[in-house]
């Protein structure tokens, strides 16, 4: 078997990310336009071929009873090739994916023992192959594969891009499967409950514990599924990314757009540290790939835990409140909501944190929580709770704010998603 050439440096300038963000949002939009699984899978295969610039793509899902990988979608490959015969997990390259590797590359399909039908691949004009597992609950349930005409080593950036597509596709497939199965059984209430569980799993299971900081969060959707989200992202050199966002609308469409925005943001944060550049890139993707009435307000901050410095950009979101014993300051440097104006240069703010500081991030479901007479909870009540409980832990402070909102609204129904994130600087 010929040795593959040396892999290109992963540090070369990226030309893939604009297309990768577009791909993630196209998958999200394909799902919001309908839950037909076959149409969704064909669209994902077409997107993968376009983004990676390869000859073809196939998506196979595992039949757990037989071990056969059932072809569910294909793009760019001939009828004779895709019908060459049954593909079995334990006799093919998919074994490597299902046994925990998640990613498998084949440089020379003619001579690699992992290829089940090398002659058919050669006749089809396929030279190399990249295979990524479709994962759910830490277990592969299928795989998506890209095929190149010439010998090719997929570099780290291409692999990361294909993994992002696979991860987002797996979530979309699971949601589409749930919708199809539950509609057939006419159990809409159960469908929403399961969808809620899937989307809730996108939120952090627990806040991190960076040295010198105390963090807590709360997310309460107004319906079974919501459009608010928050996230904590560990960065190099004792830095942390913190984000809170609110997607326009409610219900499943808002939740799907939320999942897409989260995926795009995380894809950018992997390679870009400057916060205004991260937000600017995601904004351009949203402007390109979402409908005119769709937008996202977002606050993204990078915290240098060692130096206690916060650098942030606010994209039209409710300005977080920084509370200090002698100061109350709103963090509003940034620009408009994402998805409305493509050519925006976002501003960046920076604050030196001090021991005892409390940073409160929230969505408009907090300040616009209404009582039975449609009076709003408002910022002043929020600040009053913060002043009264400034010495409480982050978790207790979240609890005090939530209790104050419930006491104010009484029996009035929650009309909007409610999300809180508290960051306390330890004394």
Image (cartoon, rainbow, N blue to C red):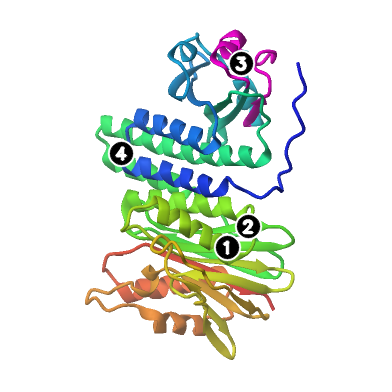
Instruction: Say which residue label 3 marks.
Output: 92
N-terminal of the pair, mark 1 or mark 3, is 3
* Residue 204 appears in the rendering: no
3D distance between C-alphas at marks 1 and 2: 7 Å
N-terminal of the pair, mark 3 or mark 4, is 4
Q: Secondary structure at mark 1?
A: helix
399 vs 372, left or right, is: right
View extreme (bottom): residue: 326
Q: Toward the viewer: 217 or 95?
A: 95
Instruction: Say which residue label 4 marks.
Output: 34
Instruction: Say which residue label 1 marks.
Output: 277
Q: Is residue 109 magenta?
A: yes
N-terminal of the pair, mark 1 or mark 4, is 4
Of circles 2 and 3, the one toward us is 2
3D distance between C-alphas at marks 1 and 4: 33 Å
Residue stretch in magenta:
102-127
- Identify the mark at residue 272; answer none if there is no mark: 2
Q: Going 63% across and 31% down the picture, which residue do you hit?
A: 103
């Amino acid at each position: 078997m010929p040795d593959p050439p040396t892999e290109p440096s992963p540090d070369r300038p990226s030309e893939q990310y604009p297309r990768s963000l577009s791909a993630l949002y196209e998958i999200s939009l394909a799902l919001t336009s309908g839950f037909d699984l076959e149409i969704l899978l064909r669209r994902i295969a077409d997107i993968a071929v376009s983004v990676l610039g390869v000859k073809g793509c196939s998506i196979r899902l595992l039949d757990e009873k037989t071990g056969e990988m059932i072809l569910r979608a294909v793009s760019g490959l001939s009828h004779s090739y895709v019908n060459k015969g049954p593909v079995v997990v334990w006799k093919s390259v998919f074994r490597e994916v299902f046994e925990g590797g998640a990613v498998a590359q084949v440089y020379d399909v003619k001579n690699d023992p992992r290829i089940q039908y090398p002659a058919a691949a050669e006749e089809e004009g396929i030279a190399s192959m990249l295979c990524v597992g479709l994962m759910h609950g830490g277990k592969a349930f299928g795989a998506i594969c890209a095929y190149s005409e010439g010998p090719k080593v997929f570099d780290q950036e291409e692999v990361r891009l294909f993994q992002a597509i696979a991860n987002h596709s797996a979530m979309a497939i699971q949601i589409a499967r749930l919708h199809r199965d539950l509609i057939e059984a006419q159990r809409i209430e159960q469908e929403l409950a399961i969808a809620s569980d899937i989307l809730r799993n996108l939120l952090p299971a627990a806040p991190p514990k960076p040295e010198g900081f105390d963090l807590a969060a709360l997310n309460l959707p107004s319906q079974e599924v919501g459009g608010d989200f928050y996230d904590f992202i560990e960065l190099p050199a004792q830095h942390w990314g913190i984000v809170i966002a609110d997607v326009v609308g409610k219900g499943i469409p808002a939740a799907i757009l939320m999942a897409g925005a989260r995926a795009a943001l995380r894809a950018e944060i992997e390679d870009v540290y400057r916060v205004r550049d991260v937000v600017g890139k995601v904004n351009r993707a949203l402007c390109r790939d979402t409908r005119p009435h769709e937008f996202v307000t977002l606050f993204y901050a990078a915290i240098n835990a060692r130096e206690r410095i916060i650098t942030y950009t606010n994209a039209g979101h409710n300005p977080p409140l920084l509370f200090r014993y002698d100061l109350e300051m709103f963090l509003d440097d940034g620009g408009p909501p994402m998805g409305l104006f493509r050519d925006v240069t976002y501003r960046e703010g920076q604050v030196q944190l001090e021991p005892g500081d409390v940073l409160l991030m929230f969505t408009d479901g907090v300040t616009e929580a209404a009582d039975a007479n449609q009076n709003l909870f408002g910022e002043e009540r929020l600040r009053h709770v913060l002043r009264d409980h400034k010495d409480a832990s982050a978790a207790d402070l979240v609890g005090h704010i939530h209790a104050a909102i419930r006491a104010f609204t009484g029996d009035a129904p929650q009309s909007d998603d409610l999300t809180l994130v508290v960051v306390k600087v330890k004394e």
